[in-house]
Amino acid sequence: MKIAIISPAFGFGGSNIVAKTVGDALASEHEVFYVAYQQDNPDFSAPHYVFLDSKRSLFERMLRPLSNAWALWVQHRFDPAASRKQSLKRLINFVNDNQIDAVILNSFDTSVFFARGLKLALPQLLVIGWFHEAVDWIQSLTRKYPVAFHQSLATLDKAVCLTHETAAYYAQWQPKTKVIYNPVQLAKHGRADLKIHTISFVARLDSQIKGLDYLVELAKRLPSSWVIKAAGMGTDEETRRFQELIKQNHVEDKLLFEGAKRGKALANHYQNSSLFISTSRTEALPLVMIEAMSFGLPIVSFAHSGAREILKDGAVGRLIPVGNVDAMARSIQEIADSVHTREEMGKLSVERYRDFAIEPIKEQWLAALKG
């Protein structure tokens, strides 16, 4: 089978990186093409990589935002697919020229842009939409074009999403919706030191989504000998605002911002801690939480949909109502007071992490591609 994964870009961004991981796994049994349409990445390396819009004209680049703005002004809603007609033509030609059997539309906007046009032009083509967003976030993102989004869902042959909550929502328009977790692939590593009085935190420095304001408030309520070490990447402005927030709240000695970490540095960050926390307001399926679990770290998280899925509604870790900093602080205190509790929670974390390994996830994708 020839499979094309259509994505805004490849090589950066969580969903785009995961698409390459899954594509590489599928490539052991099928021929896989990687097609980007929004942003080229010259550093991305893969067989059969194509940037779809490399020949896009200046007129086309200017027309797209203008047409969207006009539709919003006149009709107070718009269909994003209308501004991607030329990209759709190039995609249809690509599918025909390469005799593609199935396409995986990676991300909600890719499905909105291309699902209906592909099925209209190529009704025998297997078209799967792959959605990485939580329900509340997808509702916010598509609020200006709900009809187009729902029509795109209904047009798909199948939809794949990350949590059972999201699957129940999508099933209103696409009954062939199934849950397949995003895989986490890490180099072999050891277990975390559960005796050190350090809490690890990893997130993009988006204050609103990642709850950095909650994190700062939580730092004020930590057990006396404990600290939070926060790793994260953001723009210069986001980094500056986070650092200012820490200073304004006088928690420099309790909340230590260590910047972006990758590879061995990130592994050391997890390994040299005894607990992982998430203060996000919303998450689909946070890979950093799964990474932390692979080190045997206990997890305490606000009960966003991603945490509820990963932690099995609290069977694997502690879930706290979103925004309840006092309740999270009490839970941390209880875990901090008992090494035994941390060890038992850590065992549950490692066991749950195995569900996110690439091999079982590959088999689920192969089953989905059978039509």
Image: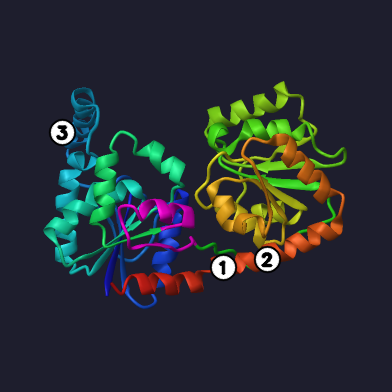
| Side of 371 relative to 288 (left or right) | left
Q: CA distance from mark 2 to mark 3?
A: 53 Å
Label 1: few (<14), some or many (≥20) within 10 Å? some
The residue under label 3 is 59
Q: Earlier in the sequence, mark 2 or mark 3?
A: 3
Relative to 15, is 25 above or below?
below
SS for tag 2?
Answer: helix
Position of the N terminus by quadrant: bottom left
Q: CA distance from mark 1 to mark 2?
A: 10 Å
Label 3: few (<14), some or many (≥20) within 10 Å? few
The residue under label 2 is 350
User: Range of the magenta residues?
Assistant: 161-182
Res 122 quadrant in image: bottom left
Q: CA distance from mark 3 to mark 1?
A: 47 Å
Relative to 352, is 77 above or below?
above
Q: Earlier in the sequence, mark 3 or mark 1?
A: 3
Q: How many marks?
A: 3
Res 254 quadrant in image: top right
Q: Earlier in the sequence, mark 1 or mark 2?
A: 2
Residue at 30 percent across and 53 percent down: it is 173
| Residue 12 locus on image (x, y percent) | 44, 49
Nearer to me, 41 or 170:
170
Residue at 19 percent across and 62 percent down: it is 95
| Residue 234 locus on image (x, y percent) | 54, 36
The residue under label 1 is 355
| Residue 71 locus on image (x, y percent) | 20, 29
